Image: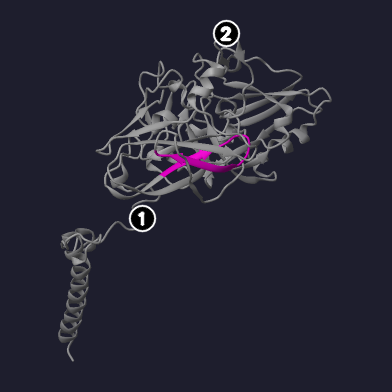
Amino acid sequence: MSDRSSADILDRRRFLRAAGLAGAGAAIAAAPAIAGEPAKPDPLITEVQDWSRYLGDGVDKRPYGSPSKFEKGVVRRDVSWLTASAESSVNFTPLHELDGIITPSGLCFERHHSGIAEINPANHRLMINGLVDKPLVFTMEDIKRMPRVNRIYFLECAANSGMEWRGAQLNGCQFTHGMIHNVMYTGVPLKVLLEEAGLKSNAEWLMLEGADAAGMNRSLPIEKALNDVMIAFAMNGEALRPEQGYPLRAVIPGWEGNLWVKWLRRIEVGDQPWQTREETSKYTDLLADGRSRKHTFIMDAKSVVTNPSPQAPLKQKGRNVLTGIAWSGRGMVKRVDVSMDGGRNWQTARIDGPVLDKSIVRFYVDFDWNGQELMIQSRAMDSTGYVQPSKEELRKVRGVNSIYHNNGIQTWLVHAGGETENVEIG
């Protein structure tokens, strides 16, 4: 048999196999997707598409992976009028575009006080001084030779949902709740470093200081430092991103994000808090009577429905999936309830995936939608028995002067056409 005839036979076999598959595809396409609907052949199934005709890029073209070009809209976004400049500002995680519990590194929200510090790790140092037996300076290599741990925690800015204290303002869960992310951190327990330096008997507080141009610093109680605080150099399996504090940052599980000092360069041990700018003029909760709540470190239980939401409206009647996230700085989320009618009736959502201490959980409710108006809410309960309050309950206690620690129940109004907006129930 000649080479030519062999090739003809192979080509014929390929043609017959493709024809058989096309026939099968046509048969599948002709079947109704939902009982009672007429069969409509779909050319996206019955016809060969371009991506099946041509070779794609090889492994040499994308040495560091990136999302598909069809996901180019899944990005962090800012709100230009919230802050004075981009260098001292915030952008928001696109919660409505995500699923599961881990936030991709490139989508973790950013909050900066003087822009992103670009630091050569070979030149970075961490100093521990103050009320210690032996002041120490660590290089990055020193730190990476110490016992390390991996932990999944959420990080939430205390100002998350802060624009909602006086009423519904920002139309999208990316903007109302997007100052949060949940990743795996790799690093060294702070306790290990402090034990190397040796604490004086009167050591009560730490001052964490960053290497950015703002010299961002915060006071931290010694009890928390010796409990679960980490000094992290990696997140989601790779080095910290520059905007997340590369090469070294503090991880303060369950506590407000401003304490998680990035580009960490110094830890001073003292016997009282430092009363820094970020814990006096900022990051205190102003009450109606003019007093302020001090050292409100813990982020209380909170949740939000991410789909449907204003940036992710309902598009089809019939089968749908409601999903969202819940978290608590007090411990683990034990239950999430969801209401479709503005809080008159509640059902327990299904939590799926890992349930970890001070970490986000993912919840779901499968439902059928017939086009009726919905008033969607979610309510988280944690392992301490704490129940997420309504916004009205919060305001009765704290007033509306604060921009921090708003963990009130969020309401989305779904209109008959599926459009969804941020509302409040009086």
Q: Which of these two is toward me, 100 or 110?
A: 100
Residues marked 1 and 2 touching at CB (< 8 Å): no
Residue 330: give x, y in percent of width and height: 63, 35
Task: Answer whether residue 198 is magenta in the image.
Answer: no
Which range of residues does the magenta coloring cover?
323-340
Judged from the image, the secondary structure of the residue bearing numbered disc 1 is loop
Query: Where residue 289 is drawn, which disc sits there?
Result: 2
Image: 47 above or below 356: below
Q: Residues within 10 Å of mark 2 (few under 14, many from 20)?
A: few
Image: 257 above or below 318: above
Q: How is the image coloured?
A: one colour
Determine which residue is flagged by label 1. Answer: 60
Front of the two marks 1 and 2: 2
Answer whether residue 112 is visible to the viewer in this image. Answer: no
Residue type pointed to by label 2: Asp
The image quarter containing residue 9 is bottom left
Outermost residue toward the front in this view: 344
Looking at the rendered image, the quarter that the N terminus falls into is bottom left
The image quarter containing residue 377 is top left
Query: Where residue 47 is drawn, which disc sits there?
Result: none
Image: 207 above or below 38: above
Residue 132: give x, y in percent of width and height: 79, 26
Task: Answer whether residue 327 is magenta in the image.
Answer: yes
Q: Which of these two is toward me, 147 or 185?
A: 185
Q: Earlier in the sequence, mark 1 or mark 2?
A: 1
Q: Residue at x 39, y 29 (%)?
A: 175
Residue 345: give x, y in percent of width and height: 45, 39
Image: 411 above or below 37: above
Residue type pointed to by label 1: Asp
Looking at the rendered image, the quarter that the C terminus falls into is top left
